[in-house]
Image: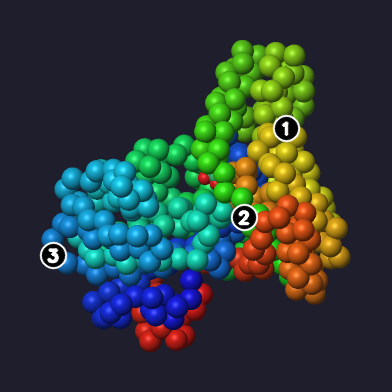
Amino acid sequence: MDLAAFQRRVTPELGDEYRLFRAPGRVNLIGEHTDYNDGFVLPAAIDRDVLMAVRPHGGRTVTLVSLDFEGVSTFSLDEIGYDPAQPWSNYLRGVCFVLEEAGFHLRGADVIFGGDVPIGSGLSSSAALEVATATAFLSLAEYDVPGEEIARLCQRAENEFVGTRCGIMDQFISALGEADRALLIDCRTLAHRSIPVPPGVKLVVGDTGVRRGLVSSEYNTRRGQCEEGVAILQTVLPGITALRDVTPEQLATHKALLPEMVYRRCRHVVTEDARVLQAVGAMEAGDLLTLGRLLNASHESLRDDYEVSCRELDTMVEIARRQPGVYGARMTGAGFGGCTISLVAAEHADAFVAAVAPAYEAAVNLTPAIYVCAASAGAREEEIGDGESGAA
Ligand code: GLA
Protein backbone atom coordinates (compact mmCIF):
# COMPACT_ATOMS: atom_id res chain seq x y z
CA MET A 1 0.00 0.00 0.00
CA ASP A 2 1.24 3.44 -0.84
CA LEU A 3 2.54 5.08 2.32
CA ALA A 4 1.24 8.52 1.40
CA ALA A 5 -2.24 7.09 0.85
CA PHE A 6 -2.05 5.31 4.20
CA GLN A 7 -0.97 8.54 5.95
CA ARG A 8 -3.84 10.44 4.37
CA ARG A 9 -6.37 7.97 5.77
CA VAL A 10 -5.00 8.10 9.32
CA THR A 11 -6.26 10.98 11.44
CA PRO A 12 -4.62 12.63 13.24
CA GLU A 13 -1.35 12.07 11.41
CA LEU A 14 1.09 9.53 12.76
CA GLY A 15 3.59 11.06 15.17
CA ASP A 16 7.18 10.08 15.93
CA GLU A 17 6.09 7.65 18.62
CA TYR A 18 4.75 5.30 15.93
CA ARG A 19 6.77 2.67 14.08
CA LEU A 20 5.65 1.36 10.73
CA PHE A 21 5.69 -2.24 9.43
CA ARG A 22 4.79 -3.68 6.08
CA ALA A 23 3.97 -7.28 5.04
CA PRO A 24 2.98 -8.34 1.52
CA GLY A 25 0.32 -10.57 0.00
CA ARG A 26 1.42 -13.23 -2.46
CA VAL A 27 0.75 -14.88 -5.76
CA ASN A 28 1.65 -18.52 -6.24
CA LEU A 29 3.32 -19.30 -9.58
CA ILE A 30 2.84 -23.04 -9.21
CA GLY A 31 2.51 -25.67 -6.46
CA GLU A 32 -1.12 -25.50 -5.39
CA HIS A 33 -2.51 -27.59 -2.52
CA THR A 34 0.92 -29.14 -2.08
CA ASP A 35 2.08 -27.28 1.04
CA TYR A 36 -0.03 -29.30 3.49
CA ASN A 37 1.17 -32.46 1.78
CA ASP A 38 4.78 -31.65 2.74
CA GLY A 39 5.45 -30.74 -0.90
CA PHE A 40 6.90 -27.90 -2.97
CA VAL A 41 5.53 -24.44 -3.75
CA LEU A 42 6.80 -21.50 -5.80
CA PRO A 43 5.13 -18.27 -4.64
CA ALA A 44 6.25 -14.64 -4.94
CA ALA A 45 5.39 -11.81 -2.56
CA ILE A 46 3.61 -9.00 -4.42
CA ASP A 47 3.52 -5.22 -4.30
CA ARG A 48 0.20 -5.27 -2.48
CA ASP A 49 0.47 -5.37 1.26
CA VAL A 50 -0.63 -4.50 4.76
CA LEU A 51 0.79 -1.40 6.43
CA MET A 52 0.68 -1.32 10.21
CA ALA A 53 1.52 1.65 12.42
CA VAL A 54 2.24 0.69 16.01
CA ARG A 55 2.75 2.90 19.07
CA PRO A 56 4.04 1.01 22.12
CA HIS A 57 3.14 2.04 25.65
CA GLY A 58 3.98 0.83 29.13
CA GLY A 59 0.90 -1.36 29.63
CA ARG A 60 -0.40 -4.71 28.38
CA THR A 61 -3.42 -3.43 26.48
CA VAL A 62 -3.65 -3.60 22.69
CA THR A 63 -6.02 -1.33 20.80
CA LEU A 64 -6.69 -2.13 17.15
CA VAL A 65 -8.05 0.28 14.58
CA SER A 66 -8.59 -0.92 11.01
CA LEU A 67 -8.85 1.45 8.08
CA ASP A 68 -10.83 -1.17 6.17
CA PHE A 69 -13.22 -2.59 8.80
CA GLU A 70 -15.60 -0.87 11.18
CA GLY A 71 -14.98 -0.50 14.86
CA VAL A 72 -12.16 -0.61 17.38
CA SER A 73 -11.07 -3.79 19.12
CA THR A 74 -9.26 -3.81 22.47
CA PHE A 75 -7.76 -6.69 24.43
CA SER A 76 -5.24 -7.40 27.15
CA LEU A 77 -2.10 -9.41 26.36
CA ASP A 78 -2.73 -11.23 29.64
CA GLU A 79 -6.04 -12.69 28.47
CA ILE A 80 -6.51 -12.88 24.73
CA GLY A 81 -9.92 -14.15 23.68
CA TYR A 82 -11.55 -14.75 20.30
CA ASP A 83 -13.78 -11.83 19.25
CA PRO A 84 -16.78 -13.06 17.23
CA ALA A 85 -18.11 -9.49 16.90
CA GLN A 86 -15.03 -8.24 15.09
CA PRO A 87 -13.72 -11.24 13.16
CA TRP A 88 -10.96 -9.20 11.46
CA SER A 89 -9.35 -8.62 14.86
CA ASN A 90 -8.80 -12.34 15.41
CA TYR A 91 -5.85 -12.49 13.01
CA LEU A 92 -4.01 -9.98 15.22
CA ARG A 93 -5.32 -11.46 18.48
CA GLY A 94 -4.31 -14.94 17.32
CA VAL A 95 -0.77 -13.87 16.52
CA CYS A 96 -0.35 -12.12 19.88
CA PHE A 97 -1.83 -15.16 21.62
CA VAL A 98 0.54 -17.59 19.93
CA LEU A 99 3.57 -15.36 20.52
CA GLU A 100 2.78 -15.02 24.23
CA GLU A 101 2.17 -18.76 24.47
CA ALA A 102 5.54 -19.39 22.82
CA GLY A 103 7.20 -17.38 25.60
CA PHE A 104 7.61 -13.96 23.99
CA HIS A 105 6.70 -11.18 26.40
CA LEU A 106 5.04 -8.53 24.24
CA ARG A 107 4.41 -4.84 24.85
CA GLY A 108 0.97 -3.28 24.76
CA ALA A 109 0.43 -0.93 21.83
CA ASP A 110 -1.98 1.14 19.79
CA VAL A 111 -2.26 -0.29 16.28
CA ILE A 112 -3.62 1.26 13.09
CA PHE A 113 -3.53 -0.82 9.94
CA GLY A 114 -4.77 -0.86 6.38
CA GLY A 115 -3.85 -2.48 3.12
CA ASP A 116 -4.45 -2.98 -0.55
CA VAL A 117 -4.44 -6.79 -0.76
CA PRO A 118 -8.02 -7.46 -1.85
CA ILE A 119 -9.71 -9.34 0.97
CA GLY A 120 -10.84 -12.89 0.26
CA SER A 121 -9.39 -12.85 -3.24
CA GLY A 122 -6.81 -15.60 -2.77
CA LEU A 123 -3.84 -13.23 -2.50
CA SER A 124 -3.34 -13.92 1.21
CA SER A 125 -4.51 -10.74 2.85
CA SER A 126 -4.86 -12.67 6.11
CA ALA A 127 -1.29 -13.99 6.02
CA ALA A 128 -0.07 -10.45 5.30
CA LEU A 129 -1.96 -9.20 8.35
CA GLU A 130 -0.60 -11.98 10.55
CA VAL A 131 2.98 -11.51 9.44
CA ALA A 132 2.76 -7.72 9.83
CA THR A 133 1.44 -8.25 13.37
CA ALA A 134 4.16 -10.71 14.35
CA THR A 135 6.92 -8.58 12.83
CA ALA A 136 5.63 -5.45 14.57
CA PHE A 137 5.04 -6.93 18.04
CA LEU A 138 8.29 -8.89 18.08
CA SER A 139 10.24 -5.79 17.02
CA LEU A 140 8.56 -3.61 19.66
CA ALA A 141 9.59 -6.12 22.31
CA GLU A 142 13.12 -6.26 20.83
CA TYR A 143 13.08 -9.88 19.73
CA ASP A 144 15.04 -10.85 16.65
CA VAL A 145 13.17 -13.84 15.19
CA PRO A 146 14.00 -15.44 11.81
CA GLY A 147 11.35 -15.27 9.09
CA GLU A 148 10.92 -19.07 9.06
CA GLU A 149 9.93 -18.99 12.74
CA ILE A 150 7.62 -16.01 12.21
CA ALA A 151 5.91 -17.95 9.42
CA ARG A 152 5.42 -21.02 11.64
CA LEU A 153 4.01 -18.94 14.49
CA CYS A 154 1.59 -17.13 12.16
CA GLN A 155 0.46 -20.41 10.62
CA ARG A 156 -0.18 -21.71 14.12
CA ALA A 157 -2.25 -18.60 14.90
CA GLU A 158 -4.38 -19.22 11.83
CA ASN A 159 -4.71 -22.97 12.49
CA GLU A 160 -5.38 -22.84 16.22
CA PHE A 161 -6.88 -19.41 16.94
CA VAL A 162 -8.69 -18.40 13.74
CA GLY A 163 -9.52 -22.03 12.95
CA THR A 164 -8.41 -22.38 9.31
CA ARG A 165 -6.24 -25.42 8.57
CA CYS A 166 -3.98 -23.63 6.05
CA GLY A 167 -0.48 -24.77 5.13
CA ILE A 168 2.70 -22.73 5.59
CA MET A 169 3.07 -21.18 2.10
CA ASP A 170 1.31 -17.85 2.55
CA GLN A 171 2.91 -16.83 5.83
CA PHE A 172 6.31 -18.04 4.66
CA ILE A 173 6.40 -15.96 1.49
CA SER A 174 4.97 -12.91 3.25
CA ALA A 175 7.82 -13.11 5.75
CA LEU A 176 10.63 -14.04 3.38
CA GLY A 177 9.75 -12.78 -0.11
CA GLU A 178 12.45 -11.17 -2.24
CA ALA A 179 12.21 -8.43 -4.86
CA ASP A 180 12.08 -9.77 -8.43
CA ARG A 181 12.21 -13.36 -7.21
CA ALA A 182 9.92 -16.26 -6.48
CA LEU A 183 10.75 -18.65 -3.65
CA LEU A 184 10.96 -22.42 -4.04
CA ILE A 185 9.92 -23.73 -0.63
CA ASP A 186 10.20 -27.30 0.56
CA CYS A 187 7.22 -27.31 2.91
CA ARG A 188 8.54 -30.33 4.81
CA THR A 189 11.94 -28.95 5.79
CA LEU A 190 11.26 -25.25 5.08
CA ALA A 191 14.49 -25.20 3.06
CA HIS A 192 14.06 -22.54 0.40
CA ARG A 193 15.82 -21.04 -2.58
CA SER A 194 14.99 -17.85 -4.42
CA ILE A 195 14.51 -18.09 -8.18
CA PRO A 196 14.70 -14.92 -10.30
CA VAL A 197 11.58 -14.14 -12.30
CA PRO A 198 12.92 -14.28 -15.87
CA PRO A 199 13.42 -10.85 -17.39
CA GLY A 200 10.98 -9.96 -20.13
CA VAL A 201 8.02 -11.61 -18.46
CA LYS A 202 5.29 -10.13 -16.26
CA LEU A 203 3.16 -11.81 -13.62
CA VAL A 204 -0.38 -10.65 -14.24
CA VAL A 205 -3.07 -11.30 -11.66
CA GLY A 206 -6.71 -11.52 -12.69
CA ASP A 207 -9.20 -11.18 -9.86
CA THR A 208 -12.41 -12.89 -10.97
CA GLY A 209 -14.46 -10.92 -8.44
CA VAL A 210 -15.85 -14.21 -7.10
CA ARG A 211 -15.68 -14.70 -3.33
CA ARG A 212 -16.91 -18.11 -2.26
CA GLY A 213 -17.77 -19.13 1.29
CA LEU A 214 -17.03 -22.70 0.20
CA VAL A 215 -13.30 -22.32 0.49
CA SER A 216 -12.74 -23.40 4.06
CA SER A 217 -15.05 -26.44 4.13
CA GLU A 218 -13.91 -27.69 0.74
CA TYR A 219 -10.28 -26.98 1.68
CA ASN A 220 -10.60 -29.15 4.75
CA THR A 221 -12.35 -31.88 2.73
CA ARG A 222 -9.42 -31.93 0.27
CA ARG A 223 -6.96 -32.19 3.13
CA GLY A 224 -8.92 -35.12 4.51
CA GLN A 225 -8.92 -36.87 1.13
CA CYS A 226 -5.14 -36.49 0.89
CA GLU A 227 -4.76 -37.96 4.38
CA GLU A 228 -7.04 -40.84 3.41
CA GLY A 229 -4.86 -41.48 0.36
CA VAL A 230 -1.72 -41.55 2.50
CA ALA A 231 -3.30 -43.95 5.03
CA ILE A 232 -4.24 -46.41 2.25
CA LEU A 233 -0.93 -46.10 0.43
CA GLN A 234 0.96 -46.73 3.66
CA THR A 235 -0.29 -50.33 3.57
CA VAL A 236 1.89 -50.91 0.49
CA LEU A 237 4.45 -48.11 0.90
CA PRO A 238 5.19 -48.26 4.64
CA GLY A 239 7.92 -45.59 4.53
CA ILE A 240 5.65 -42.73 3.46
CA THR A 241 4.25 -40.08 5.79
CA ALA A 242 2.80 -37.64 3.22
CA LEU A 243 1.94 -37.48 -0.48
CA ARG A 244 5.29 -35.79 -0.91
CA ASP A 245 6.87 -39.23 -0.56
CA VAL A 246 4.85 -40.79 -3.39
CA THR A 247 5.96 -40.63 -7.02
CA PRO A 248 3.46 -40.42 -9.90
CA GLU A 249 4.61 -43.92 -10.93
CA GLN A 250 3.98 -45.41 -7.48
CA LEU A 251 0.55 -43.83 -7.38
CA ALA A 252 -0.32 -45.29 -10.79
CA THR A 253 0.87 -48.73 -9.65
CA HIS A 254 -1.42 -48.69 -6.61
CA LYS A 255 -4.38 -46.97 -8.23
CA ALA A 256 -6.74 -49.90 -7.64
CA LEU A 257 -6.41 -49.56 -3.85
CA LEU A 258 -7.85 -46.07 -3.76
CA PRO A 259 -11.43 -44.84 -4.14
CA GLU A 260 -11.61 -43.09 -7.51
CA MET A 261 -11.98 -39.57 -6.11
CA VAL A 262 -9.18 -40.01 -3.59
CA TYR A 263 -6.99 -41.29 -6.41
CA ARG A 264 -7.64 -38.14 -8.45
CA ARG A 265 -6.91 -35.88 -5.45
CA CYS A 266 -3.63 -37.70 -4.89
CA ARG A 267 -2.78 -37.57 -8.58
CA HIS A 268 -3.10 -33.80 -8.53
CA VAL A 269 -0.72 -33.49 -5.59
CA VAL A 270 1.99 -35.86 -6.79
CA THR A 271 2.00 -34.48 -10.34
CA GLU A 272 1.90 -30.90 -9.05
CA ASP A 273 4.98 -31.50 -6.90
CA ALA A 274 6.78 -32.77 -9.99
CA ARG A 275 5.61 -29.73 -11.99
CA VAL A 276 7.01 -27.32 -9.38
CA LEU A 277 10.48 -28.79 -9.69
CA GLN A 278 10.25 -28.78 -13.49
CA ALA A 279 9.07 -25.16 -13.37
CA VAL A 280 12.11 -24.16 -11.35
CA GLY A 281 14.34 -25.79 -13.96
CA ALA A 282 12.49 -23.98 -16.73
CA MET A 283 12.73 -20.64 -14.93
CA GLU A 284 16.43 -21.05 -14.34
CA ALA A 285 16.94 -21.99 -17.98
CA GLY A 286 14.82 -19.03 -19.14
CA ASP A 287 12.55 -21.53 -20.89
CA LEU A 288 9.28 -19.60 -20.75
CA LEU A 289 7.42 -21.89 -23.11
CA THR A 290 7.95 -24.87 -20.81
CA LEU A 291 7.15 -22.78 -17.75
CA GLY A 292 3.90 -21.66 -19.36
CA ARG A 293 2.95 -25.23 -20.30
CA LEU A 294 3.49 -26.29 -16.70
CA LEU A 295 1.20 -23.52 -15.46
CA ASN A 296 -1.45 -24.65 -17.91
CA ALA A 297 -1.11 -28.28 -16.81
CA SER A 298 -1.40 -27.18 -13.18
CA HIS A 299 -4.71 -25.50 -13.94
CA GLU A 300 -6.08 -28.55 -15.74
CA SER A 301 -5.09 -30.74 -12.80
CA LEU A 302 -6.69 -28.39 -10.25
CA ARG A 303 -9.84 -28.19 -12.37
CA ASP A 304 -10.27 -31.87 -13.23
CA ASP A 305 -8.52 -33.87 -10.51
CA TYR A 306 -8.63 -31.61 -7.46
CA GLU A 307 -11.89 -29.89 -8.46
CA VAL A 308 -11.16 -26.54 -6.84
CA SER A 309 -11.68 -24.32 -9.88
CA CYS A 310 -14.99 -22.76 -10.91
CA ARG A 311 -16.61 -21.44 -14.07
CA GLU A 312 -15.27 -17.91 -13.60
CA LEU A 313 -11.68 -19.05 -13.02
CA ASP A 314 -11.85 -21.35 -16.06
CA THR A 315 -13.28 -18.54 -18.18
CA MET A 316 -10.59 -16.08 -17.10
CA VAL A 317 -7.88 -18.65 -17.81
CA GLU A 318 -9.28 -19.43 -21.27
CA ILE A 319 -9.51 -15.74 -22.19
CA ALA A 320 -5.99 -15.13 -20.88
CA ARG A 321 -4.52 -17.97 -22.94
CA ARG A 322 -6.01 -16.53 -26.14
CA GLN A 323 -4.09 -13.24 -25.79
CA PRO A 324 -0.85 -12.54 -27.68
CA GLY A 325 2.33 -12.98 -25.66
CA VAL A 326 0.83 -15.32 -23.03
CA TYR A 327 3.00 -18.28 -22.04
CA GLY A 328 0.51 -19.83 -19.63
CA ALA A 329 -2.32 -19.11 -17.21
CA ARG A 330 -3.83 -20.85 -14.21
CA MET A 331 -5.88 -20.32 -11.10
CA THR A 332 -3.78 -19.38 -8.07
CA GLY A 333 -4.45 -19.88 -4.36
CA ALA A 334 -6.99 -22.19 -2.77
CA GLY A 335 -9.60 -21.83 -5.57
CA PHE A 336 -13.42 -21.63 -5.74
CA GLY A 337 -13.05 -18.03 -6.94
CA GLY A 338 -10.29 -15.56 -6.30
CA CYS A 339 -7.51 -14.98 -8.79
CA THR A 340 -5.68 -16.31 -11.81
CA ILE A 341 -2.03 -15.76 -12.68
CA SER A 342 -0.86 -15.32 -16.26
CA LEU A 343 2.69 -15.28 -17.48
CA VAL A 344 2.80 -12.56 -20.12
CA ALA A 345 5.64 -11.25 -22.30
CA ALA A 346 6.46 -7.77 -20.95
CA GLU A 347 5.75 -5.97 -24.21
CA HIS A 348 2.25 -7.48 -24.33
CA ALA A 349 1.31 -6.84 -20.69
CA ASP A 350 -0.59 -3.56 -21.20
CA ALA A 351 -2.56 -4.92 -24.13
CA PHE A 352 -3.31 -8.06 -22.10
CA VAL A 353 -4.78 -6.03 -19.24
CA ALA A 354 -6.84 -3.95 -21.65
CA ALA A 355 -8.21 -6.97 -23.52
CA VAL A 356 -8.93 -9.48 -20.75
CA ALA A 357 -11.13 -7.27 -18.56
CA PRO A 358 -13.88 -6.53 -21.12
CA ALA A 359 -13.82 -10.07 -22.55
CA TYR A 360 -14.25 -11.55 -19.07
CA GLU A 361 -16.98 -9.11 -18.16
CA ALA A 362 -18.87 -9.92 -21.35
CA ALA A 363 -18.58 -13.65 -20.64
CA VAL A 364 -19.61 -13.82 -16.97
CA ASN A 365 -21.14 -10.43 -16.22
CA LEU A 366 -18.69 -9.63 -13.41
CA THR A 367 -16.14 -6.82 -13.36
CA PRO A 368 -12.66 -8.23 -12.83
CA ALA A 369 -9.51 -6.48 -11.59
CA ILE A 370 -6.47 -7.22 -13.72
CA TYR A 371 -3.07 -6.00 -12.62
CA VAL A 372 0.58 -6.51 -13.29
CA CYS A 373 2.42 -7.52 -10.09
CA ALA A 374 6.02 -6.97 -9.13
CA ALA A 375 7.65 -9.73 -7.07
CA SER A 376 8.47 -7.91 -3.86
CA ALA A 377 10.37 -8.08 -0.59
CA GLY A 378 8.88 -9.74 2.49
CA ALA A 379 7.89 -8.15 5.80
CA ARG A 380 9.97 -5.23 6.98
CA GLU A 381 10.01 -2.06 9.05
CA GLU A 382 9.82 1.26 7.23
CA GLU A 383 10.54 4.86 8.03
CA ILE A 384 7.37 6.83 8.55
CA GLY A 385 9.07 9.84 6.92
CA ASP A 386 6.84 12.40 5.31
CA GLY A 387 4.71 9.85 3.51
CA GLU A 388 5.71 11.16 0.10
CA SER A 389 8.61 8.92 -0.78
CA GLY A 390 7.83 5.60 0.82
CA ALA A 391 5.61 3.93 -1.77
CA ALA A 392 6.21 0.19 -2.09
C1 GLA B 1 -4.41 -21.34 0.76
C2 GLA B 1 -3.64 -21.83 1.98
C3 GLA B 1 -2.23 -22.28 1.59
C4 GLA B 1 -2.27 -23.27 0.42
C5 GLA B 1 -3.15 -22.75 -0.71
C6 GLA B 1 -3.36 -23.74 -1.80
O1 GLA B 1 -3.81 -20.18 0.26
O2 GLA B 1 -3.55 -20.81 2.95
O3 GLA B 1 -1.58 -22.83 2.71
O4 GLA B 1 -2.69 -24.53 0.86
O5 GLA B 1 -4.43 -22.35 -0.24
O6 GLA B 1 -2.16 -24.00 -2.46
Q: Residue at x 75, y 73 (%)?
A: 350
Q: Residue at x 45, y 57 (%)?
A: 128
Q: Earlier in the sequence, mark 1 or mark 3?
A: 3
Instruction: Indicate if the residue with disc 3 has its beta carbon within 8 Å of ligand 1.
Output: no
- The one nearer the camera, 38 or 331, is 331
Q: Residue at x 70, y 48 (%)?
A: 313
- The one nearer the camera, 44 or 147, is 44
Say if mark 2 contacts mark 3, CB within 8 Å.
no
* Front of the two marks 1 and 2: 2
Q: Amino acid at mark 1?
A: Asp
Judging by the rendered image, the residue that carries numbered circle 1 is: 305
The answer to which quarter of the image holds residue 180 is bottom right
- The one nearer the camera, 201 or 332, is 332
Q: Amino acid at mark 2?
A: Gly
Q: In the figure, is residue 15 to the left or right of 232?
A: left
Q: Earlier in the sequence, mark 1 or mark 2?
A: 2
* Front of the two marks 1 and 3: 1
The answer to which quarter of the image holds residue 311 is top right
Inter-mark Cα distance, 2 to 3 = 43 Å
Judging by the rendered image, the residue that carries numbered circle 3 is: 58
Query: Mark 2 falls on what kind of element?
Result: loop
Query: Mark 3 falls on what kind of element?
Result: loop
* Front of the two marks 2 and 3: 2
